[in-house]
Amino acid sequence: MVEESETLRHARPRGPRGGWFPLGIAAAVVAVLVGGWTAVNAALPDSTPVTSGHSMMIATGSGHEAKLSFDEGWELHPGSSTAGQQYRLSKGPVRVQVSVVDPPERTSETELWEGMREVVRVGDPSASLTDPRPVTSESGAEGLTGALHSNESIGTATLFPSPNGGFAVESTATSGESGADLADAEKLLQSIRFDRTTGGS
Amino acid sequence: MSHARPEPEITSHKGARVPSPRDAVRGPEGTAGTEPLPAPHEGPSRPQRLPRLVTAIVFGLLCLAGFAIMANGLLGSVLVFFGEAVLSALMLTVVGVVGFWVLRRIRPVRSPSATFSFLALVWGMTAAVGLALVANDNLSAIWNTLGGLSFGGAWGAALTAPLNEELLKVIGVVLIAVIAPRVVRGPMDGFVIGSLVGLGFQLVEDFTYSMNVIAMQGGLDGTAAVVQTFLLRVVLTGLGSHWAMTAVAGTAVGLMVASGWRPGRRHGLRAALLLLTAIGVHWFFDSPIIEGFVGVLLKSLLAFLAAVIVYFVVRHTYRSRVRRALAEEGEELGMRRSAAMSLANRRGRRGELRHVAHPERPAVERRQERMVEFAEDRASEYRVPFRE
């Protein structure tokens, strides 16, 4: 057995590949995955224009789907958006962040607003919401809206629960320190409508 | 490393047991006419020291960078939902402690180095997570931009995470193999160290998910969100998650190490297949194919099965080799073959110790340890990583 094992030994060719080679491969992989994707992403356009009059489905669930209607000049930032969850939009200096949330059952609008007060502070600790007031969209959907203040910007926050409360669409619109031009954002958010989906409850 | 066949440390004529410490006194410098066996922990030669040092620095810097990126991404959520973050961290710490113990324990013969096991965990928790955040953000953005939001929503995760995360996790195994060649000597070590890297990654990812789910549920009832996430990602899919995928990928690194980073076609192909298996299983997990509760269970089970199959193949081969090496050593030392081979597992060593007088046990234990170290050294030098 000893003789037999001798024939099996001496197999590892130890050479200059002992250290630098795997280190080089590892460094190259990190460079490609981190630097390479960053470079490719930077080379691509940051935003794509949304066709005027286009109605975009932003959320679906519990038998309803939510849609926003765009007028001219809006752009979607696909790199910062996730279908059905989160959308980043802009029009000139106005920035709109739309988030779709799945609240616990039987959550009231006021509770949703209180939750939203916390969530806006995640991205910007200085952000705060005023007390909300009722708002009705062009299609008749009821929600809440209020002012958003932070060290960096002034804006508005709006939420619309879906008719059966299965999900809610929460959005913030900001426009620099002045808060000018928010009318376009308010118009966009007022365009929200909830349609029944086929076979929905 | 010398290719000379190790000579016996002593020429013992004891038959049936681990040689007593009195025999060992004749020791390495010992018996006339025999060449002393090199100490099992030979220091690196000067040409090897520099790449190890540089690799250690790179390892440390990437861990720091990854931690900074991760902390920057999570700090806002942690500060706002502090209580929930503490709850999630506590629950995951328990999982981490149990997972760390189990995954070190599954290595046959001996558990891996505690230090490098911990460093593997740290790599998974910091460098791999932080770098993956950057890589995933950018690659997801690329898919969304090129393919549109619908395509990105359906396939973005499957085309992003498997490639970025599996490679960034397994790089931790590669770096540890360079820093500490005795810690990753072959497929078995690659499996265990890889599983620990994956465990670290999994823990931080679970924590991140729990924070994200709180926001996705509108910032309401965060405690329920944390518990739900725990049930989904630990109880339901925890067995077939990152630890399993990186264990499979780490086995590929072990194969590369065993061939001195110069694999022939066969071993290169096996290593590539293992890495592709890890990426493929991850791809299937993240793909929109077979969705829903059953789909998640099936996908998780597949990842677990892949790891289990690889584990048992590698374990069988490794144990066979160590036992053979111990048998050879035992023969050289004049030990009974069965007694020598029994040292290949923890229970066998304890059993042998019971036959020794109590005062002599510490010395015999040390001697067992050395024999096992030599046996593992020998075993790692046998040709053909997978088959005898």
Image: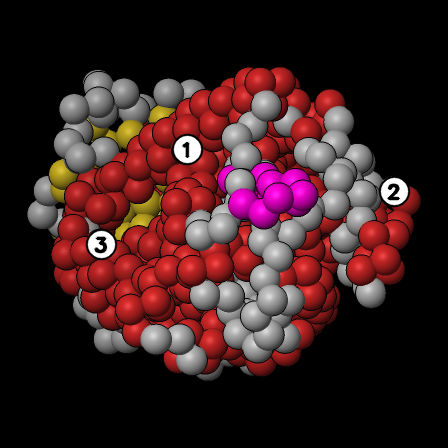
Residue drawn 16% across the image and 24% down it: A151
Dot 3: within a 10 Å radius of its alpha carbon, few (fewer than 14), some, or many (20 or more) residues?
A: many
Looking at the rendered structure, whether the residues under marks 1 and 3 are on a common chain is answered as: yes
Establish if B158 lies above or below B72.
Answer: below
Q: Provide the chain ID for the residue under circle 3.
A: B
Q: Are marks 2 and 3 on the same chain?
A: yes
Q: Is residue B59 left or right of residue B259?
A: left
- What residue is disc 1 on? B63
Neighbor class of circle 2 (other Cα within 10 Å; few <14, some 14-19, many 20+) is: few
Q: Position of residue A65 (x, y in %)?
A: 48, 63
Mark 1, chain letter?
B
Q: Which residue is mark 3?
A: B85
Eye-nearest disc, 1 or 2: 2
Image spot of residue B97 (x, y percent) = 32, 62
The image quarter in which residue B244 lies: bottom right
Q: Name the subunit of mark 2.
A: B
Colouring used for the render: secondary structure
For the residues beneath circles 1 and 2, the answer to whether they share a chain is yes
Question: Which residue appears at 27% of the width and 20% of the height?
Answer: A176
Q: Is residue B227 above or below residue A19?
A: below
Which residue type does callout 3 highlight?
A: Ala
